């Protein structure tokens, strides 16, 4: 709990669109509600378009604006660089920041390729030796119901894990008239639904189970290959619209994954179910304050899925927010992420997920693309050493 006299750290954020807004809220929520032992100060926001960046900076109370991320890193009043830009810029900015001695929070997926992610993980390991910390922004780990799920698995409540069933379903591309944004271009985004939302369910699977995905067999598809450009004409979609793949976890459990932007009516349905010898867990982000738990060790007469309302002070993160029962939303996980990173920095611990965790997700994404290119051939994933 912070109190008057709590040391401050200046945050410098690169990017100011959707994720920039989410992270701005995150820093503010962390400071106000979670009160970490290092207080974030919104020092400066960087964006190439000064007018647009200034408008966002004013809305979210960023003190100053830079139009070059290098200038942001060079500022003495900035101790942490928060990267909220498309994937093609992550490696260059993160490595430069770490080398300059700044802590880093980087949005997911960590990079656009395994080579970039590996270079970032190496830079993070070198920086760690100098007390500089790096975290990858797989924010859903900080949804209280999923943090609770992790606790239950770690306590052994599921017994031996048999299955993971992970889906991330959205529908914002079902309209063929939806414009060709950067998210639909490989050179900017790395991949499509796979890297944008598939990365989340791969990370969650590895986080919840504590095991890595050891191999995959995949299909990917691009349903709409030409889309209108924002300024007229059309352009080519160069990433996947959807992917589905089978996986095997290191401990022997079978996993299925699906990530799509074409699931009409599913808005942000991140769903994950785990089945073990002693029980099951099920979560759907569209009901994000709820976790379903089946205890197979309970008496047969009362056995059944329990719908846990994850809104109580006993649950992860909840004690810092509203009175019991009031519930949280999408933005709160960003506040938890910010507070956890600041606490790790202040107490000299390694934040999670690390860049090495981000690299391990990237390796799975690469294996999915390789498998799909080889006609769904089984493709092993050799996880990067911890
Ligand atoms: C778009 O599909 C997106 O905004 C992702 O980029 C985010 O990571 C996810 O939280 C919500 O959906």
Image (cartoon, rainbow, N blue to C red):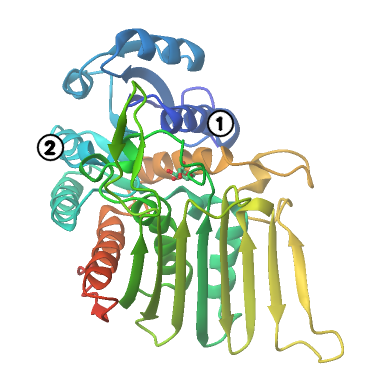
- The residue drawn where x is 56% and y is 80% is 156
Residue located at (18% from left, 57% from top): 114
| Residue hosting label 2 | 99
Tell me if label 2 and label 1 are in contact, CB under 8 Å.
no
Q: Is residue 203 left or right of residue 307?
A: left
| Residue at 51%, 81% in the rendered image | 163
Q: Which circle's residue, 2 or 1, is located before the other in the chain?
A: 1
- Compared across the picture, whether 72 is left or right of 231 comes to left
Quadrant in the rendering for residue 205: bottom left
Q: Quadrant of residue 118?
A: bottom left
Residue 198 percent across, percent down from the top left: 41, 58
148 vs 190: above or below: below
Ligand 1 lies under 8 Å from the Cβ of mark 2? no
Give x and y (percent) for residue 62: 42, 15
Q: CA distance from mark 2 to mark 1?
A: 29 Å
Classify mark 2: helix, strand or loop: helix
Q: Residues within 10 Å of mark 2 (few under 14, many from 20)?
A: some
């Amino acid at each position: 709990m912070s109190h008057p006299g709590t040391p401050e750290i200046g945050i410098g954020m690169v990017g100011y669109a959707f994720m920039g807004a989410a992270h701005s809220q995150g820093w503010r929520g962390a400071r106000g509600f979670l009160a970490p032992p290092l207080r974030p100060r919104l020092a400066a926001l960087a964006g190439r378009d000064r007018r647009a960046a200034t408008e966002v900076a004013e809305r979210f109370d960023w003190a100053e604006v830079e139009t070059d991320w290098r200038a942001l890193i060079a500022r003495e009043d900035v101790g942490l660089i928060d990267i909220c830009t498309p994937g093609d810029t992550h490696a260059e900015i993160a490595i430069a920041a770490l080398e300059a001695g700044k802590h880093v929070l980087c949005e997911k997926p960590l990079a656009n390729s395994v080579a970039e992610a590996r270079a970032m993980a190496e830079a993070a390991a070198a920086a760690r030796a100098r007390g500089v910390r790096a975290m990858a922004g797989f924010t859903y780990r900080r949804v209280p119901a999923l943090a609770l799920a992790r606790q239950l698995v770690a306590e052994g409540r599921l017994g031996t894990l048999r299955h993971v069933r992970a889906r991330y379903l959205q529908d914002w591309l079902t309209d063929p008239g939806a414009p060709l944004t950067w998210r639909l271009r490989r050179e900017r985004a790395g991949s499509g639904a796979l890297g944008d939302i598939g990365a989340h369910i791969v990370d969650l699977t590895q986080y919840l189970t504590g095991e890595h995905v050891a191999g995959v067999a995949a299909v990917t598809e691009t349903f709409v290959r030409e889309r209108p450009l924002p300024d007229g004409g059309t352009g080519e979609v160069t990433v996947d619209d959807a992917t589905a793949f089978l996986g095997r976890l290191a401990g022997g459990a079978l996993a299925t994954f699906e990530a799509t932007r074409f699931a009409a009516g599913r808005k942000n349905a991140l769903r994950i179910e785990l089945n073990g010898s002693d029980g099951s867990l099920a979560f759907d982000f569209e009901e994000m304050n709820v976790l379903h738990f089946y205890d197979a060790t309970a008496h047969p007469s009362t056995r059944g899925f329990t719908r846990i309302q994850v809104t109580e002070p006993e649950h992860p993160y909840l004690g810092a927010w509203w009175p019991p029962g009031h519930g949280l939303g999408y933005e709160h996980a960003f506040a938890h992420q910010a507070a956890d990173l600041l606490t790790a920095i202040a107490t000299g611990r390694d934040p999670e997920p690390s860049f090495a965790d981000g690299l391990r997700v990237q390796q799975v994404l690469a294996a999915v693309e390789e498998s799909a290119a080889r006609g769904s051939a089984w493709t092993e994933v050799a996880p990067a050493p911890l």
